[in-house]
Amino acid sequence: MGLRASYLFSALIAFTCLSSCASRDIFSSDSIARPLAAGLVNIILPEASCTGVQIDALRAITAAHCLYNRKGGGVVSLEEIRVVKDVGPPHVSVRVSSAEMFPGFAIASRAVDNFNYDVAVLTFSDLMPGSFQNPNTLNIPLRLGDELATVYYKNVKKHLELVETPCSLLNRKKSVLVLDCPVDFGASGAPVYKIGRNGSSDLVAIIVAKAMWGRKRVALAVNVGSV
């Protein structure tokens, strides 16, 4: 796109956190198994539902803002968080024993730079079976126009629906990536993969917000290999 990062981010006139209201019927969704969804988990909170990605048998990462109450901005109690894998029956659900967030994150801040720290690591109270995706700690190079993809759970009429959508990288500022894929509520914490020529996929980022760039709907993601 050729625009300087400073101009791009001044043009992001609106951005929105992407948690969505959970429902009591949330586990009755039929989801289609897809390769990019292998490590996907759903983070169920008292007031919202977010997506996350499992990185080993005891941990997942998601967006830090998901862990805050809407009223008062306080952190939710760990006892009120569930991490669910395979939302259609039979699903696996575990509790959270600890949650770690980057000290630079401020829930009240509306600064774009704050998204650099919008990452939380959840530790489970029990082992979560199944496959998972490790973030690449070597910080895979990302270039404008790279082929990426994200996958997340969208709440549709009180049921969770698996959404997989291609993206390309428009620009970045530090760890914050601007992607051309429109995302909806429920996508906070969703993994972003870089797609290789041989069909391989590497976890490079998680979705943290949706935004408007002029009249174009875009997604903001934080590069987990560089935070």
Image: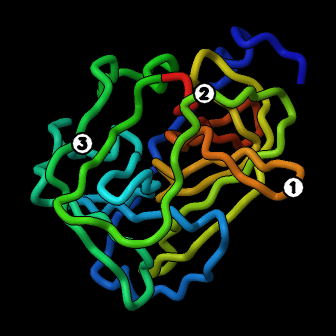
Q: Assess whether mark 3 and mark 2 are in contact (beta carbons under 8 angstroms).
A: no
Q: Which of the 4 image quadrants contains residue 49?
A: bottom left
Q: Quadrant of the N terminus?
A: top right
Q: Mark 1 and mark 2 in contact? Answer it, CB < 8 Å.
A: no
Residue ID at (25%, 59%): 45
Amino acid type shown at disc 2: Leu
Q: Residues within 10 Å of mark 2 (few under 14, many from 20)?
A: few
SS of the residue at dot 2? loop
Q: Amino acid at mark 3?
A: Tyr
Looking at the image, is mark 1 or mark 2 earlier in the sequence?
2
Along the horizontal axis of the image, is 170 left or right of 117? Answer: right
Quarter of the image for residue 93 reads bottom left
Where disc 1 sits, the SS reads loop
Using the rendered image of the protein, determine whether residue 134 is visible from the camera's viewpoint: yes
Mark number displayed over residue 138: 2
Q: Position of residue 220 (x, y in %)?
A: 60, 35
Along the line of sight, the residue nearer the viewer: 30 or 122: 122
Image coordinates of residue 201 in percent, x first then y, are 71, 52
For residue 172, side relative to residue 99 (left or right): right
| Dot 1 amino acid type | Asn
Q: Which residue matches tag 1?
A: 198
CA separation in Å, label 3 and label 1: 39 Å
Q: Is residue 41 above or below residue 87?
A: above
Q: Nearer the viewer, residue 4 or 82?
A: 82
**Number of other residues with Cα within 10 Å of mark 3, as a class: few under 14, some 14 to 19, many 20 or more:** some
Q: Mark 2 or mark 3: which is in front?
A: 2
Secondary element type, mark 3: loop
Gap in angstroms between the C-alphas marked 1 and 2 = 20 Å
| Distance (Cα) linking label 2 and label 3 | 30 Å
> Circle 3 sits on which residue?
68
Q: What residue do we see at 25% from left, 35% from top? A: 100
Q: Position of residue 74 (x, y in %)?
A: 15, 37
